[in-house]
Image (cartoon, helix red, strand yellow):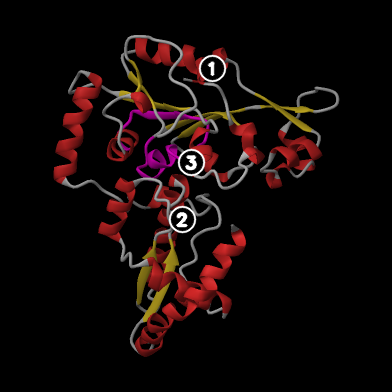
Amino acid sequence: MKDKATLRRVVQLPLGLPFLVLVVLALPWRRIRVGRLRSERIGHYLMNTELALCATDDERRSGSRPVIDFYFDVPPISNEQIQVMWKRRLRIGPRWLLQPAYFILVALRLRSFVIDSPAEDRDVSDCFARKAPFLSFTSREEREARSQVAELLGSEDAQWVCLHQRDSAYLSQRMGNRDWGYHSYRDTPIQDYKLAAELLARGGYKVIRMGKVVAEPLPFHFPGVIDYPNHALRSDFLDVYLAAHCAFFLSTGSGIDSVATVFRRPQLLVNFPLAFHPLIGNSNHLFIYQHFRDAETGAPLSLHELAERRAWQLFSTTEFERAGISLSRNSSQEIADAA
């Protein structure tokens, strides 16, 4: 599969030549750049693009040479509403033309003509605190969304909390061309969030269990707790609106919560397994870690001890095992206490 993709890219390289000619001809007046949108994963589709735009905005404010930026999407598109919104904000051109040009520029190391999307979705420059979101809803979208939310929640003025726990269903179903088990340590069962959901519902919130594809339906029922992935109103459009307007987003650190991040909504991250992830420094984020223990003795590990084991480099189940670190989930009570 990978060899076929590589061969296809090589065959398509000549298609990028017209765009490269445009880049050269425009050089005396403008610098034209091309960038790849990581549209196949909603977290990267949002976070990496938002961070790239923050960097571009800083460059323009610094008075550097004017640039014209073009982008292309890569299927499968993780969320069609996000694509619609980015098209209002960015010049998104045909992939068949721009992707070959992008690969040629990268191969020739002409990085000044490439938009470097951040390799990770970390706001290390604290740009979210300095800048407003680059995405927005139209007036028509706002009216349509409010009508659907009122139908979903049974109220026009309810506040809601989005709840999402990561499982393997989405990647297995939508991107099953590879083994995603390397980060299965991030998966948790929805049953663990029962106490938190009931607590929030008793406090007057509607609790919306989020997800485009989930491994199992909500295994408990409580007034005000909604199993949205299995609801008739579930859509890419409403996914984005709900997360962008929630009172806060309770998550385990997964793709859909990036909507809340880019719209600057408060978040509570539980079962968090990455001890040195810079995103946890955001002022409107609270978090509790998973339990880090020595795999041999079972003794709890401090942040200092995790640093000694270079835990900032660990992103797969195998890497944690090699470092002698075992992870265990937060209890239902711990999650409820945090909520």
Q: Which residues are magenta?
A: 244-265
Which mark's residue is nearer the viewer, 1 or 3?
1
Mark pair 3, 2: CA separation: 23 Å
Q: Is residue 274 visible?
A: no
Say which quadrant the N terminus sits in: bottom right
Q: Is residue 259 above or below residue 330?
A: below
Mark with earlier residue (1, 2): 2
- In this orientation, which residue lies closer to the viewer: 163 or 123? 163
Amino acid type, label 1? Asp
Q: Position of residue 194 (x, y in %)?
A: 47, 13
Q: Position of residue 213 (x, y in %)?
A: 43, 33
Q: Are marks 1 and 3 in contact (CB under 8 Å)?
A: no
Magenta segment includes 69? no
Number of other residues with Cα within 10 Å of mark 3, as a class: few under 14, some 14 to 19, many 20 or more? some
Query: Under tag 1, what secondary structure?
Result: helix
Mark pair 1, 3: CA separation: 25 Å
The tag on residue 38 is 2
Amino acid type, label 2? Arg
Mark with earlier residue (3, 2): 2
Residue at the disc numbered 1? 192
The tag on residue 282 is 3
Q: Quadrant of residue 159?
A: top left
Q: Name which residue lies at 32% across and 9% down.
A: 223
- In this orientation, which residue lies closer to the viewer: 130 or 8? 8
Magenta segment includes 254? yes
Q: From the viewer's perspective, is 213 left or right of 206? A: right
Q: Quadrant of residue 239?
A: top left
Q: Name which residue lies at 58% across and 30% down.
A: 187
- In this orientation, which residue lies closer to the viewer: 163 or 38? 38
